[in-house]
Amino acid sequence: MSLPASTSIPQSGTGPADHPRATSTQPQPEVAPLETSTWAQRLKPEAVLVAGGLLLTLFGQVLVQEVPAQTSRNSFLLLGIGLGLLFAGALHAEARLLPAVRWNALTRLLNWLRITSAQAICLLLAPAFAFVASEAAGVLGKMVNPVVAMLAWAFSILLVVIGGWSGHLPSWKPTWKIMGPALALFAGAVLIRGIQTATIPIVLSGDEGSAGWNAFEWVQGKVNNPFIVGWYSFPSFYFMLLSFSVRFLGTTAEAIRLTSAFAGALTVVALYFVARPWLGQRAALMASAFL
């Protein structure tokens, strides 16, 4: 029996199985970015780049005019970074030159962190704004630019929260079964700590007096920098909080001690809320009562 002329018999060594390299050139499937239905997925990288670059440019321009000349190079660096981010964000919005993450390794990292590319940009921008706050605050008692320093500090915290937030609000509904004991604990803690603060203890120690004096310097306007250290290398932020009570109650023992009493009462409530989901209502109440 003869075969048709158009029919050919495959020769040995020419089949697909005989060429193992034929399948090695096929592209590997890409790792899909994290899919979420939250606001984090709707947050666009170009929007974060443009907003962050605009703010860094604005802050850098202000600092260039106000910081000393010997340290102005940091301000020019911030100004350049801001302009670069603004330009990159504008290009991405116009021509999509920076598409969503397509590298498998980086995509796997973002998926493992459970964040989007826009959130990753927020986390990378946070140290830049913290640096702006440091430059605008300076190292002396009076800040170089209080408005820029406090705004940049707030933005750095906000960027960290946005970058690490899962996008799901906790489904916790306050009830009297939870809030009632918390309010009772707070009221009891304030009363125990706040009664007779003028005479208990009867002696105003040197540490209390020194803290009060630092707070009074805030009231006088000699100090306004919460990012440095004050008396005995304590963070100046504490003396800023203490200055609020000094403004209302004057230079008295009550003004110095009530701030600490109020902060201590808040820790009692915080312990209750932390311990209750882990240990139960009874254990949380007992731990808070001991504190």
Image (spheres, rainbow, N blue to C red):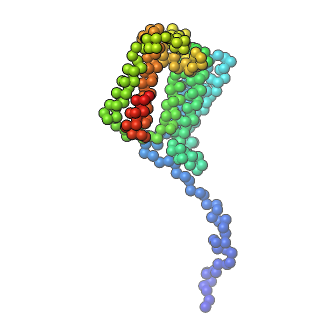
Q: Nearer the viewer, residue 83 or 220?
A: 220
Total marks in image: 0
Q: Nearer the viewer, residue 236 or 13?
A: 236
Q: Is residue 255 visible?
A: no
Q: Nearer the viewer, residue 5 or 159?
A: 159
Residue furthest to the left: 176
Residue 84 appears left or right of 262: right
Q: Give the residue displayed 40% in from the left and 33% down from the top.
A: 286
> Based on the displayed image, in which of its 4 quarters is residue 174 positioned?
top left
Residue 175 appears left or right of 63: left
Q: What is the x, y in percent for residue 36? A: 45, 46
Q: What is the x, y in percent for residue 206? A: 54, 12
Q: Give the residue displayed 60% in from the left and 32% down from the top.
A: 84
Quadrant for the C terminus, please: top left
Q: Give the residue displayed 56% in from the left and 49% down from the top.
A: 108
Quadrant for the N terminus, please: bottom right
Q: What is the x, y in percent for residue 105? A: 60, 49
Q: Is residue 287 visible?
A: yes
Placement of 265 over or under 25, stated as above or below: above
Q: What is the x, y in percent for residue 86? A: 56, 32
Placement of 64 over or under 89, stated as above or below: above
Q: Give the residue displayed 56% in from the left and 20% down from the top.
A: 235
Residue furthest to the bottom: 1
